[in-house]
Image: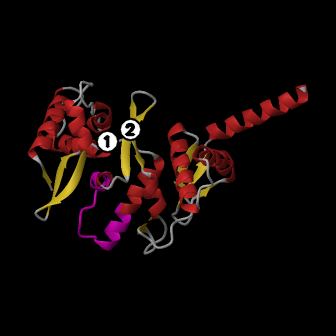
Amino acid sequence: MHIEPSLQSVIDSHVKTSLATFGRNKDEQVMQKTALVAFAGLGLARAVLQNGETTWVKTDRLKELETSPTAPVDLSKVMTPVAEGAGEPKLTGSLKLLIEDVIATARERDPETAWNFDGILLWLAEQGLATVGPINGDEWIWRADPTLIDCYKMGKKGNRGIGIVKKPKIRMDETLEAATEPMVKLLEVQHGTKLDHAAKRLGTISMLLCEEITGDAIAYKDNKGRLAWKASEKLQLALIGGASEAEGSLAAD
């Protein structure tokens, strides 16, 4: 793997700042890798093939940011969890489960290679299948792109991975389905047309990923090792509260 000099210079600047502040006494190579993963997840760096070698280069988005009068890119929120010794950045439950499954599948097929979490996350970011962004103001979290959920199948040995012919079913409990379906219908209203199966499927996945971030949905592996979601206690209580208010209004009428 090679990093073009202009991008390396930007990364070096961020790493230098990190090591002097929140990343004191941390390994410089670890912080270099973390910075590259962060740049990829933010859409600021991409991998291209040059002379048969993978090279990381600046994206147009980064070039625009460098010439704009806005504040410089701040990677501290993305890199701090690693600097504080958490071992890995903060991820949504579905992305964490998927990466663990990718590693397990890769080890089955190639046990000689040292597959690792950061390497898979970097590869997913390179493909645009994982991104990082802010939630709750100061907190940053990595999340799967809907297309990753759409095309990656988890499950038993020999029948999982990206590009499986039959796409995986989107599994969720009845409570979550009841909460998600109206939001997908709202998408149709906003588009002014009925969504086809593929668009509705991606819309449903997008809603589930949003509900993960808000704490309304919890991703887990079912008893067959497949990705699924269930309503959180927070959502269940909110739905119970909403139903009670509706009953109270009807009684008052």
Instruction: Specify whether 130 is left or right of 202.
Output: left
Residue 217: horizontal and vertical position, in percent?
57, 45
Q: Is residue 4 magenta?
A: no
**Residue labelled with disc 1:** 42
Query: Which residues are drawn in magenta?
Result: 103-123
Residue displayed at 65% across by 49% down: 181
Tell me which secondary structure the magenta stretch mostly adopts: helix
The three-letter amino acid code for the residue at tag 2 is: Gly
Asked if residue 252 is positioned above or below residue 151 in the image, the reply reads above
Q: How many marks?
A: 2
Residue 25 visible? The answer is: no
Residue 149 visible? The answer is: yes
**Residue labelled with disc 2:** 133
The three-letter amino acid code for the residue at tag 1 is: Leu
Q: Is residue 122 magenta?
A: yes
Instruction: Specify whether 198 is left or right of 186.
Output: left
Secondary structure type for disc 1: loop
Q: Quadrant of residue 163?
A: bottom left
| Disc with the residue nearer the chain's start (1 vs 2) | 1
Residue 71: horizontal and vertical position, in percent?
26, 25
